[in-house]
Amino acid sequence: METKAVALARFSGDWALADDSGLEVDALNGAPGVLSARQLLDAVRRICYDLPVVGMDVVEVAPPYDHADITALLGNRVVLEALSAIARRRKDARDGTHCGALT
C-alpha cells in the first residue's frame, strides 16, 4: 500500500513531499506519517537549493484543528526554509560558490 503523498505524485505527475498525515501524527493516534517535521524541513531546504524551484504552495492548515498553532508554525517555517534556500542558491550561482552544509 502506497502513502497518500506517493499516490498524489503519481496522479499529478508533480513532486509531493508530504500530506497532512506526515505532519499531524497525533491525528493518526501516534502512527508514523510520511515525514517528521524535521525531515520535511531538511527535504524542503535541500530541494529548493538543489533544484530550480520557482514556486510552492502550503495548503490545508486548519486553525480550528490546530489548537497549539503547531501546524501553522510549521507551515510558516516551511515557507521560510524554501525562500532562504532559493535565495542562497541564487547568491551562490552569482558568486560561483556552493553551500554543501544545508542539512
Image (cartoon, helix red, strand yellow):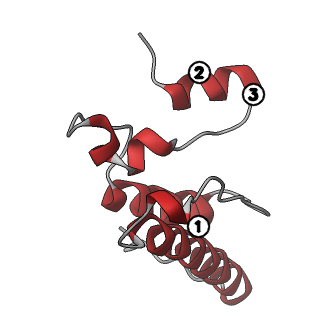
Q: Is residue 51 left or right of residue 39?
A: right
Q: Looking at numbered disc 1 in the image, what kind of residue is underneath it? A: Tyr
Residue occupying image coordinates x 63% and y 82% = 92
Q: Is residue 5 above or below residue 87?
A: above
Mark 1, Cα crowd under 10 Å, few <14 / some 14-19 / many 20+, is many
| Residue wearing tag 2 | 7
Q: Secondary structure at mark 1?
A: helix
Instruction: Give the answer, above or below, for where 27 lies relative to 40.
Output: above
Q: Residue furthest left?
A: 30
Q: Give coordinates of residue 72: x percent, y percent.
A: 50, 70
Q: Position of residue 22 (x, y in %)?
A: 40, 43
Nearer-N-terminus badge (2/1): 2
Label 2 and label 3: CA atoms lie apart by: 10 Å
Q: Which of the two discs, 2 and 1, sits closer to the camera?
A: 2
What is the secondary structure assignment of the residue under circle 3? loop
Which numbered tag is attached to residue 13? Answer: 3
Based on the displayed image, in which of its 4 quarters is residue 79 positioned? bottom right
Residue under the image location 58 percent in, 75 percent down: 85
Of the pair 7 and 43, the residue shown nearer to us: 7
Tell me where residue 44 appears, x and y as whole percent. 52, 60
Task: Identify residue for label 1.
Answer: 49
* Residue 7 falls in image quadrant: top right
Q: Which of the marked residues, 2 or 3, is nearer the chain's N terminus?
A: 2
What residue is at 56 percent from the left and 57 percent from the top?
Answer: 47
